[in-house]
Image: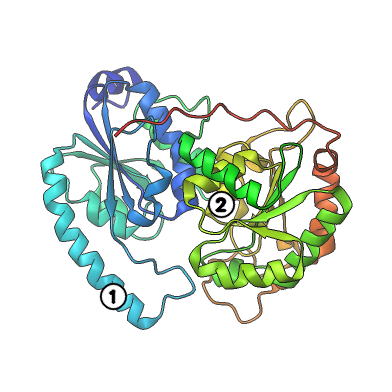
Amino acid sequence: MSDGNGAAARSLDGKRILVVRLSGLGDVVLTLPAVRALRRAYPRAHIAWLVADSCREALDGNPDLDEVLPVRLTSLTDRSATLSRRLAATRDFALEWCRMAAALRRGRYDVVVEFQNLLKCAAFTALNRRALRVGFRGGGEGTHLFLSRAPVRKDVADHSVTNYLRLAEALGAKAEPVEFPVAVPPEAERAAEEILGRAGVVARDRVVLLSPFARRETKLWDLGRFSEVAATLARTYGVRVLCAPGPADMPAAEALASRAPVALARGASLKVLCALLRRSTLFLGVDGGPMHLAGAVGTPVLAIYGPTMMRWIGPWGSAGGSPAASGVPSAVAVHIQDRLPCAPCHRRVCDHHSCMRGLPASLVLAAAERHFGGLLRGEVAPPPRPPAMPVRAG
């Protein structure tokens, strides 16, 4: 393959491309624009995606993919990552690596694009010995040693979406327009309407979807402050507040609903969550997969950030977007990182949580009024949403 874009296009169209981005949900969502760019550049290519089974639903029906290859992996970044769970995860990883070795040999991929820049991804990438293996330089885990080419240096001073698009550009794709294809099937739309109906939400109601949950404990904000914000939003703007927890978060969600006027969307799948987000006026929550899904389907985002590096993994609209003609921004991040010497950080455990515990509810409510007040009162039209993506059959 030549480094020239024209030669790259001639060599990749009609070829078999494997994307490696295993997890987490938000990171998978943020990789979608780069894969869409590859599809635009190479419409005749066969594009497959190797992804953790916990994130597979985000890719089901994706119009840019010919194949999704799920890998059964145990997360080590969530709050339940005990020593026994880590040992089990190591065992499971070895078993999956052996299982996927045969599957990847059968796939006969010509090019592997490793977006995650982690050793666990490099282990799967390396199984494709005859393929051109492309990924990032830098990152600290030596993943470039498993690659044929590392044409782009990972730059954490820039947004992850921009980094991923640079890697796609190195393969001959064009970064613009930046699009997040998330397929929402009609049955998910119907299920979302049923959930809203049970919650008493009618067509004219404005909905705020609240997501106070995260896998990492350091990203969590105080549930009492979330209750205060939810109650104030409902009282001040007349909005309906909805929360769609996963099974592990149900106890916390029920505690939240007992303290504030919050309706619970019990048992909502990821696709149903996407449909609920498309129906919502505003997303309010912490850094996590649902926040990035909200941005992907075009719902305005008010994100509460603590330890994580916003330049790298912040809500995309706050980094690369601009307010719509109505003046409503696509995303706003609320944080106090600039007041703390320890932020940002990558800790999974923290003994003081200053970045989240020091963030008052008043700051979040002030941001809601300043940036989204007209939208929440119904005085300003919501920004246009991207068109619903066609669902790929199979």
State the residue position of label 2: 290
Q: Amino acid at mark 1?
A: Ala
Query: Could you tell whether 144 is left or right of 208 in the image?
Result: left
Residue at the image position 37 percent from the left and 29 percent from the top? 38
Q: Nearer the viewer, residue 340 or 28?
A: 28
The secondary element bearing badge 1 is classed as: helix
Report the number of discs: 2
- Residue 187 image offset from top left, x and y in percent: 47, 39
Residue at the image position 51 percent from the left and 58 percent from the top? 267
- Residue 141 image offset from top left, x and y in percent: 35, 60
Q: Amino acid at mark 2?
A: Pro
The answer to whether residue 278 shows anywhere in this view is: yes
The secondary element bearing badge 2 is classed as: helix
Residue at the image position 59 percent from the left and 60 percent from the top? 308
Marker disc for residue 117? none
Q: Nearer the viewer, residue 349 or 82?
A: 82
- Residue 201 image offset from top left, x and y in percent: 71, 46
Mark 1 and mark 2 lie on one chain; the one further toward the N terminus is 1
Q: Nearer the viewer, residue 173 or 80?
A: 80
Marker disc for residue 88? 1
Residue 15 to residue 26: above or below: above
- Residue 17 image offset from top left, x and y in percent: 26, 34
Q: CA distance from mark 1 to mark 2?
A: 27 Å
Q: In terms of image quadrants, where is residue 336?
A: bottom right
Query: Could you tell whether 383 is left or right of 380 in the image?
Result: left
